[in-house]
Amino acid sequence: MIEVKNLYKSFEDKDVLKDISTTFENGKTNLIIGQSGSGKTVLMKNLVGLLTPTSGKVLYDGRDFVAMSKKEKVMMRREMGMIFQSAALFDSMTVLENVMFPLDMFSSMTLRERTKRAKECLERVNLMGAEEKYPGEISGGMQKRVAIARAISLNPQYLFCDEPNSGLDPKTSLVIDELLHSITQEYNMTTIINTHDMNSVMGIGENIIFIYEGRKEWQGVSGDIMHSTNQRLTDFIFASDLLKNMRSVVLEHEGK
């Protein structure tokens, strides 16, 4: 579990995050949503240590990440997996070599053990047979699955995903969502996902934090959204006339 307590982040004289307190739960897909510029990416960067909060605490199972020394943070990051928006694979490495990279860097396994572990991760994301291909030879959806395999290779307790469905078609996005959700439950990880994808929000949003102008505006589960009275949330989720009409139809049907 990750707890955020009274988190502020300012750049010069501009407050970007303002007194955010929330909890990201184990074994659940925790989603951070909000408009562009709302502060959700800054929040994630503060969680993983790419930025340092102006004030406040980030607790990893009770351990204050902000107060840790540089050496302690390096050790802490070994418990984290990261999936970047662009997949961020090494073009000069094969799929297998990409998945093995964290193991080569941070594990004390033998080459045989590292290879076995990487292949297990590729099998988990249904990519057996693609080991010797290069990133440029596989689809965008397959690249994201390689990124997931790499992120879980060290058995992280915490998994961070920045727009994992960016650039993917709706069908492939659903595959990635289901994969992230099932892996989260299987490994009992604390998974945090930054997303604009409303299918992800409604499909796998087990704990959703809505950020508005740097503040936590709303928190709940996907099932609560349809009936929410928070106007800023509903304006964001049901931005199009089609979605607004669908919501009206659902609520009208439930009211009968």
Image (spheres, helix red, strand yellow):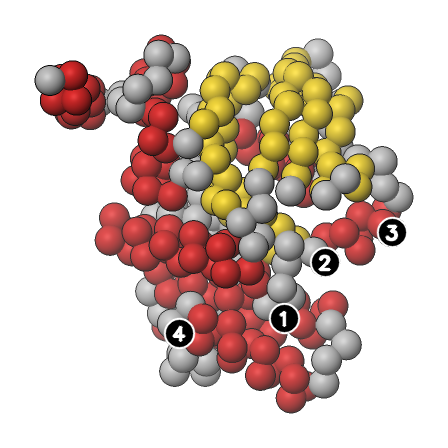
Residue placed under numbered mark 3 in the picture: 71
Question: Tag 3: residue type?
Answer: Lys
Q: Which of pointers 3 and 2 lies earlier in the amino acid sequence?
A: 3
Instruction: Indicate the quadrant where residue 18 lies.
Output: top right
Task: Say whether disc 2 or disc 4 marks the residue closer to the N-terminus.
Answer: 2
Residue drawn at x 32%, y 42% is: 203
Q: Residues within 10 Å of mark 4 (few under 14, many from 20)?
A: some
* Residue furthest to the bottom: 112
Of pointers 1 and 4, the one earlier in the residue sequence: 1
Please indicate, yes or no, whether residue 82 appears anywhere in the rendered image.
no
Q: Nearer the viewer, mark 3 or mark 1?
A: 3
Of the two numbered discs 1 and 4 in the rendering, the one whose residue sits closer to the viewer:
4
Residue indicated by mark 1: 101
Residue receiving disc 4:
127
Quick one: SS at disc 1? helix
Q: Nearer the viewer, mark 1 or mark 2?
A: 2
Q: Residue at coordinates 72% horizontally, 43% vertically from top-left? A: 61
